[in-house]
Amino acid sequence: MTMNTVSFTPDTIERAWHVVDLQGVTLGRAASRIAAVLRGKHRPTYTPHADCGDFVVVVNADQLVLTGNKLQDKMYRRHTGYLGGLKEMTAAQALAKDSTKVVELAVKGMLPKGPLGRRQLKKLKVYAGPDHPHTAQQPQALDLSKV
């Protein structure tokens, strides 16, 4: 008896919407679980080369927690492209400026690099406060301990 492997395509996947509350949650642990849901690794129909994940809405991004001395020691760096154009800011400065970027960068680092990862990152919606405009999609609460 031969068994055939079924490879799922994004057209055959029904995407769900999940909402995650980051109030008092550690950034790295939350980001790894969110990345797994964006990739679709929580489904039995997971296909590594296809975008089969769900949408994730993150609320209260400004109330996340960084452990240890990361607020002072963790640096976010970017380069303008000009000589001497290295720009640095600590995690505390980045959270004060735009806490949604901190969450997006943490999740982006845990997704695959290339076109597939960029397509999966577009399904992440991050908001600093408790309100979001995606109530029409009826997102289900996602328990970060079970993913």
Image: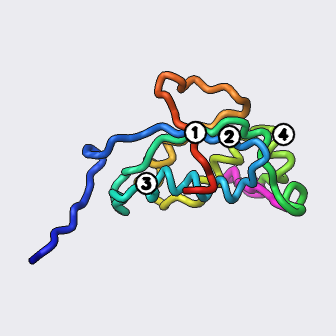
Q: CA distance from mark 4 to mark 1?
A: 26 Å
Mark sitting earlier along the chain (2/1): 2
Closer to the eye: label 2 or 4: 2
In what element is the residue under mark 4? Answer: helix
Dot 3 or dot 2, earlier in sequence: 2
Instruction: Specify start and end residues of the magenta stretch as a single range.
Output: 73-86
Q: Is residue 95 above or below residue 139?
A: below
Lower sequence index among marks 2 and 4:
2
Give the amino acid type for the residue marked by disc 4 in the picture. Ala
Q: Return the residue at label 2.
A: 21
Can you give x and y, in whole percent of width and height, for residue 35 in the image?
54, 54
Residue in view at x 53 percent, y 39 percent? 18
Q: Nearer the viewer, mark 4 or mark 1?
A: 1
If the image is split into quadrants, where does the N terminus sit?
Answer: bottom left
Tell me the tag on residue 96: 4
Image spot of residue 140 (x, y percent): 53, 36
Mark 2 near mark 4, Cβ–Cβ under 8 Å?
A: no
113 part of magenta stretch: no
| Tag 2 secondary structure | strand
Position of 48 with respect to 133 (left or right) is: left
- The percent coordinates of residue 114 (x first, y second) are 45, 58
- The CA distance from mark 2 to mark 1 is 8 Å
Residue behind mark 3: 40
The x, y position of residue 90, in whole percent, is 84, 53
Write down the residue under mark 1: 141
**55 relative position to 58: left or right:** left
Number of other residues with Cα within 10 Å of mark 2, as a class: few under 14, some 14 to 19, many 20 or more: many
Q: Quadrant of the C terminus?
A: bottom right
Q: Secondary structure at mark 1?
A: strand
Give the residue type at disc 3. Gly
Image marks 2 and 1: residues in contact by CB distance under 8 Å: yes
**Residue type of the residue flagged with mark 2:** Asp
